[in-house]
Amino acid sequence: MLVVRADAADLGKHVHGKAQLAYLDPPFSVGVAFGARTKKSESRGRFARDSARFAYDDRWPSLEHYLAWLEPRLVATRELLGPHGTMWLHLDQRAVHDAKRICDRLFGARAFVGEIIWVPGNGTRARKGPGVSHQTILIYAAGKDYVWNSKDPALRAPFAATSLAMHFTNEDDDGRAYRVRTIGGKSYRYYADEGRALGSVWMDCPAMVANTPLRKEGTGYPTQKPLKLLERIVRAASDPGALVIDPFCGSGTTLHAAALLGRDAAGCDIGELAIETTTRRLREAGFPVELGTDPTRRRPRSPR
């Protein structure tokens, strides 16, 4: 596993070969600075100089400034993708629609594979209007023949009992129950034990409560994503032995998932805490870490 303290725009200086999967979880343009809870006595979430260690600053003069910062990092990621690769860009309602227009221009509108609506399960605090209870992951492909492991169990869910009883009434020579559906004059066989495709709304990967010690995988990093979510993404869009990259590695969940699933991985972050957290997490899990250095790295934005 390669871990580099560097700007996302510079990851290509350290990665050899092309990636089959790039997962990006950049700042969301939330408008606050984030701190990490590294001790039980420290406060959670937003950065407080007297209580939490600084993680990263997500304050911007305007959305236009944020998008101008994001675009060259998307370009750099695109250049690292192999012909069968996909980029997964994780954002929320603040910037995802504008970011999609940028991605359509950079990759081509036809390269848009689709989007995942992730429901973290944290509820909402909205006092007026519909509360936002989801985040969005945009998926773009480098070419037409991109990797998508649709039969992987991580992308399947069991059929309902009523569906099994009503429709899966046939058995093959091996005793596997199946149903046959004819669509457009062509017949398709669906096996009960393969389950149904999950679709684009994922509600079964609850968010990490990263600032509390409630989960064993918690690191204290403020915007840590759950391992289950990243394992599903890695299994969906990469093959064993392929290269997975994360230009905003944060708490290291992408690299951890890739290592567990037998992929190679490389990640970077400009934050000192992110590199420390990722490195410690991987080593504690028993995975070797190669620490890269970038003498020309840009200084991280500090709280104003």
Image (spheres, rainbow, N blue to C red):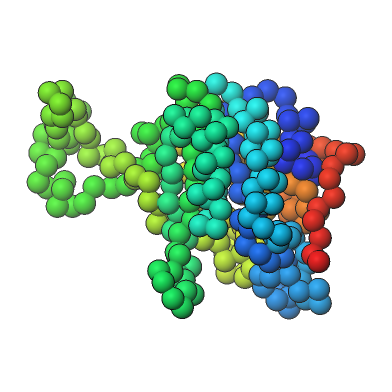
- Please name the residue shown 57% across and 66% down the image: 209
Residue 32 in which image quadrant: bottom right
In the image shown, does 172 or 220 lie closer to the viewer? 220
**Residue 239 versus residue 288 in the image, above or below:** above
Q: Residue at x 72, y 41 (%)?
A: 8
Side (left or right) of 64 relative to 276: left
Nearer the observer, 172 or 89: 89
In the rendered image, which quarter contains the N terminus? top right
Looking at the image, which residue sits at the far right? 295
Nearer to us in this view, 186 or 33: 33
In x, y percent, where is residue 74? 63, 38
Q: How many marks?
A: 0
120 in relation to 66, above or below: below
The residue positioned 73% from the left and 38% from the top of the image is 9
The residue at 73%/30% (across/down) is 12
Please state the horizontal and vertical placement of residue 89, each as a whole percent of the image.
Answer: 55, 44
Answer with left or right where residue 294 lies relative to residue 237: right
Residue 76 horizontal/vertical position (percent): 68, 33
Quadrant that contains the C terminus: bottom right
**x then y, percent, for residue 3:** 75, 41
* Image side of residue 10 versus residue 207, left or right: right
Residue 124 lies, with reference to residue 259, above or below; the image says: below
Q: Is residue 280 visible?
A: no
Q: Quadrant of residue 168?
A: top left
